[in-house]
Image (cartoon, rainbow, N blue to C red):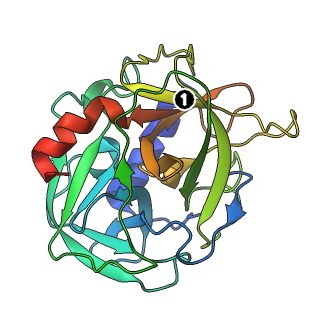
């Protein structure tokens, strides 16, 4: 019940964008400009309000979570790249098209399934690649062993939302690729998802993870995108899992739309 209420509140924020509670990844560290050049901020066109993250995969395509863009007009978004602060102005282009995976069921998310929570956003004009803006390669490898990964975003800073922060954050996490990683009482299908554990390795009493407007943001190993932030028991609940869309499972679908 509490989980459902939380997700409804998040969807309200995403759809209506009337509040400004941008924050940062819980227990993350600030990132310098150009350190994560594939990170994008999704906003309403004509607004500075950041509501979701995304990852640049070509000069015109961004991969994000379906829940971030569901029900939106195709030209209603502002895609901002090349920033490490929400107050900064990087390269910004209006969206031209939005594609949601056909298997995503908004009405059943996440009460009965979190599968196929992936979407694509195409910009009206191409981004110019620089040391501050560049795409990330999509992973085609099916992860089977735990590994160190990096998440990034502008999401909430504490489990209760915390103070606003405009700085891009990153966090080192460990993947749990084969599960089990059931969270909030929901069984996670590991064919389509990959998880990280919400406990800091160096201090077992510290909660870590993504929150709220980190959704849609990248999970990266080395120089490859392995996941997109999808769902969790908000936020960074100790001994629970953050759930990400498993990119390797969707390579063919992404390629059929984007050519990447």
Residue 245 quadrant:
top left
How many numbered dots are placed on residues in this image?
A: 1
Q: Is residue 218 above or below residue 164?
A: above
| Quadrant of residue 117 within the rendered picture | top left
Which residue in the protein does label 1 denote? 195
Residue at image point 35% right, 68% down: 43
Q: Would you say 170 lies left or right of 132 here? A: right
Does 107 sit left or right of 195 as displayed? left
Task: Decide: is 131 above or below 106.
Answer: below
Please tell me which residue is depicted at 50% across the width and 85% down the height of the picture.
88
Q: Residue visible at 27% across and 74% down? A: 45
Residue at the spot 34% in from the left edge and 82% down from the top edge: 91
Viewer can see residue 34? yes
Q: Residue 236, relative to residue 178: is it above or below?
A: below
Question: Could you say which is closer to the camera, residue 127 or residue 44?
Answer: 127
Q: Which of the two residues, 192 or 107, is positioned nearer the viewer here?
A: 192
Q: Do we see residue 46 in this rendering? A: no
Q: Which residue lies furthest to the bottom in this view?
A: 89
The image position of residue 149, as x and y in percent, is 59, 43
Secondary structure under the numbered disc 1 in the rendered image: strand
Residue 233: percent from the left, percent from the top?
A: 59, 31
Camera-nearest residue between 257 and 109: 257
């Amino acid at each position: 019940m509490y989980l459902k209420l939380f997700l409804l509140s998040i969807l309200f924020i995403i759809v209506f964008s009337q509040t400004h509670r941008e924050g940062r990844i819980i227990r993350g560290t600030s990132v310098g400009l150009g350190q994560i050049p594939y990170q994008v901020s999704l906003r309403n066109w004509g607004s500075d309000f950041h509501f979701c993250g995304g990852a640049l995969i070509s000069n015109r395509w961004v991969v994000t979570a379906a829940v971030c863009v569901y029900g939106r007009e195709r030209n209603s978004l502002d895609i901002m790249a090349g920033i490490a602060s929400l107050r900064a102005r990087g390269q910004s282009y209006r969206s031209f098209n939005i594609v949601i995976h056909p298997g995503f069921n908004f009405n059943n998310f996440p009460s009965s399934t979190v599968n196929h929570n992936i979407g694509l956003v195409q910009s009206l004009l191409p981004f110019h690649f620089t040391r501050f803006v560049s795409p990330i390669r999509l992973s085609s490898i099916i992860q089977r062993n735990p590994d160190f990964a990096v998440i990034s975003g502008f999401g909430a800073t504490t489990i209760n939302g915390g103070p606003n922060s405009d700085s891009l954050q990153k966090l080192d996490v460990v993947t749990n690729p084969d599960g089990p990683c059931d969270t909030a009482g929901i069984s996670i299908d590991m064919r389509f998802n990959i998880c990280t554990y919400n406990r800091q390795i160096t201090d077992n009493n510290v909660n870590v993870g993504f929150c709220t407007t980190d959704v849609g943001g990248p999970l990266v190993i080395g120089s490859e995108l392995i996941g997109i932030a999808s769902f969790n028991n908000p936020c960074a609940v100790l001994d629970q899992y953050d759930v990400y869309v498993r990119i390797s499972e969707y390579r063919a679908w992404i390629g059929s739309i984007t050519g990447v």
